[in-house]
Image (cartoon, helix red, strand yellow):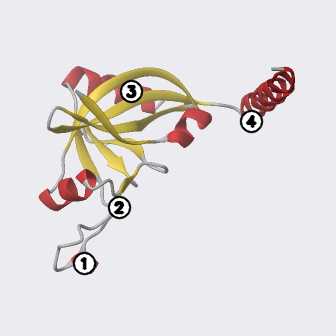
């Protein structure tokens, strides 16, 4: 039913996830071909509100191999996403508050459609990130120590 194309793994480390929505994304035919081939990257992408529309920025979709004018295509152009009107107004109001961001975390197939998982997130502070890294290293060391005995 769902096949994940790509995830924004960096966002899981940088943000606390609050709410999520499933959104449509406006794509051109050659972008769909590239996404089906897995040539997409969400690492630095984010969503901004421009006059009651939500736009995905910095999503890199490579140009399709068989396309003749590959060099003239902008691979990181802004793409419109579609959500309900109430959701768009809610998200645009949240963007005006401090520390909140809207980020795309997953791009996936739902049946034959390409969908985008949109998350409302709050920035983690530096000490929170350090705490996560500290916990990871302690877990690794504990597993390593336990594996010696079993």
Q: Mark 4 — residue?
A: 126
| Left or right of 16, for residue 37 | left
Nearest to the observer: residue 127 or residue 131 = 131
Name which quarter of the figure residue 114 lies in.
top left
Gap in angstroms between the C-alphas marked 2 and 1: 12 Å
Which structural element holds mark 3?
helix
Q: Mark 3 — residue?
A: 93
Q: Quadrant of the N terminus?
A: top left
Give me the residue at 28% from left, 23% from top: 87
Which structural element holds mark 1?
helix
Q: Position of residue 91 (x, y in %)?
A: 36, 27
Q: Mark 1 — residue?
A: 72
The residue carrying pointer 4 sits among few (fewer than 14), some (14 to 19) or many (20 or more) residues within 10 Å by Cα, namely few
Disc 4 to disc 1: CB gap under 8 Å: no
Disc 3 to disc 2: CB gap under 8 Å: no
Gap in angstroms between the C-alphas marked 1 and 3: 36 Å
Give me the residue at 22% from left, 29% from top: 83
The residue carrying pointer 2 sits among few (fewer than 14), some (14 to 19) or many (20 or more) residues within 10 Å by Cα, namely some
Gap in angstroms between the C-alphas marked 3 and 2: 26 Å
Which structural element holds mark 2?
loop
In primary-sequence order, the first of circles 3 and 4 is: 3
The residue carrying pointer 1 sits among few (fewer than 14), some (14 to 19) or many (20 or more) residues within 10 Å by Cα, namely few
Q: Position of residue 24 (x, y in %)?
A: 21, 36
Give me the residue at 70% from left, 32% from top: 125
């Amino acid at each position: 039913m769902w096949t994940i194309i790509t995830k924004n793994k960096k966002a899981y480390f940088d943000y606390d996830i609050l709410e999520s929505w499933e959104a449509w994304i406006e794509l051109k035919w050659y972008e769909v071909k590239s996404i089906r081939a897995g040539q997409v990257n969400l690492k630095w992408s984010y969503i901004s509100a421009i006059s009651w529309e939500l736009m995905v920025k910095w999503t890199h979709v490579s140009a399709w191999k068989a396309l003749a004018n590959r060099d003239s295509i902008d691979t990181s152009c802004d793409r419109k996403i579609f959500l309900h009107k109430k959701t768009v107004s809610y998200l645009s109001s949240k963007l005006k508050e401090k520390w909140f961001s809207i980020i795309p975390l997953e791009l996936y197939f739902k049946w034959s459609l390409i969908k985008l998982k949109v998350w409302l997130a709050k920035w983690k502070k530096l000490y929170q990130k350090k705490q996560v890294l500290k916990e990871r290293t302690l877990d690794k060391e504990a597993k390593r120590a336990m594996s010696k005995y079993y």
